[in-house]
Amino acid sequence: MNSVLADVPVVNGPITNGSCLGANANVTIADCGDSALVAKAVGLEAEDAWQLVHALADALNAVQPTGVHDVVPTYDALLVEFDCAVTDHDTVRRVLAHEAARLGPHPAPTKPPRRFVVPVVYGGEYGPDLPEVAAQLGLTEGEIIVLHSGSDLTVRCLGAPAGAPMTDGPPFPKPVPRLASPRTRVDPGSVAVAGRQAVICPMPSPGGWPLLGRTPVRVLDLHSDPITAYRPGDTFRFRPIEPQQWDDYADLSLADCTDPVVRHG
């Protein structure tokens, strides 16, 4: 799995040079502009790297270093943004290195994962790209639905917009290409795939990922803190429903859909 921060250069050296290899030999730490650092997991399998950067994010959020205002974990890297008028690279780097050393290369998850069962209407107006994806993969539409809904998909990180849940992709035989012409608007609740990833669109936005279906449940709750019911490490299991069942779920939020799924009737 590739990080969205993979292109940030990492130069190992003493702290005075602006970058360092922390006491945890599986974490490199590098400056990222004048008010951020990137910690990257190295020398680990993809799953272990993901576990390490998310445990490090949880550790930083727990200690709340002075001046740090955002901690963004992805697949194998962690962006730490801070107020450069309050703190500096070296101070934040020392906290990062300390927490990385404390965790070691294989930290245990800090919170048990939850499982969400998400109702989805596939195809038609709800998933207009289902036929094209099936053709691209040499499968029937029914086989695409079975593969997409047939296993739990782990939330790996929260992306744009508004904390979109970026999950592992279903076990398709090959990656799914993005659309040649992105849409200017994707409806909230749209269930999309691209490459070997999957996502639920939480709010109206442009998008270039093929749409397989849509869920009637609300993905975001703007009156809650946090506004998302899910976090990295949780899992989604998509459950096919018929279009005539849409209204049965339309007043539910994703928070209502922990296993077993809540439904009317």
Image (spheres, rainbow, N blue to C red):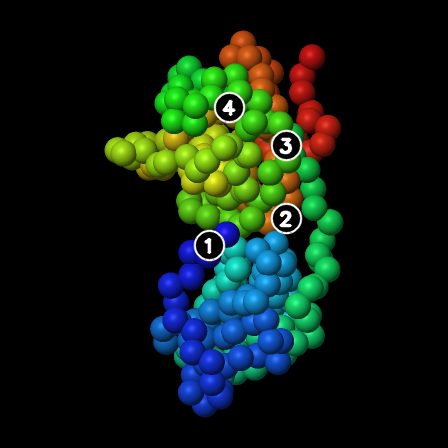
- Counting residues from the start of the chain, the first of labels 4 and 1 encountered is 1
- Residue 104 position (above or below residue 173): below
Dot 4 lies on which element? helix
Q: Where does label 1 land, which residue?
A: 2
- Counting residues from the start of the chain, the first of labels 1 and 2 encountered is 1
- Which of discs 2 and 3 lies nearer the camera? The answer is 3
- Which of discs 2 and 4 lies nearer the camera? The answer is 4
Task: Give amino acid for label 1.
Answer: Asn
Q: Is residue 60 left or right of residue 18?
A: right
Task: Give amino acid for label 2.
Answer: Gly
Dot 2 lies on which element? loop
Cα gap from disc 3 to disc 1, whole angstroms: 22 Å
Cα gap from disc 1 to disc 2, whole angstroms: 17 Å
Q: Residues within 10 Å of mark 4 (few under 14, many from 20)?
A: many
Task: Give amino acid for label 3.
Answer: Ser
- Residue 81 position (above or below residue 73): below
Residue 146: quarter of image: top right
- Which of discs 1 and 2 lies nearer the camera? The answer is 1
Q: Where does label 3 land, which residue?
A: 151
Cα gap from disc 4 to disc 1, whole angstroms: 24 Å
Cβ–Cβ under 8 Å for marks 4 and 1 = no
| Residue 46 location (% of width, % of height) | 57, 55
| Residue 201 location (% of width, % of height) | 45, 36
Seen from the viewer's position, the closer of residues 98 and 177 is 177
Q: Where does label 2 land, which residue?
A: 233
Q: Where does label 4 land, which residue?
A: 144
Dot 3 lies on which element? loop
| Residue 25 location (% of width, % of height) | 60, 76
| Residue 14 location (% of width, % of height) | 49, 88
Residue 62: quarter of image: bottom right
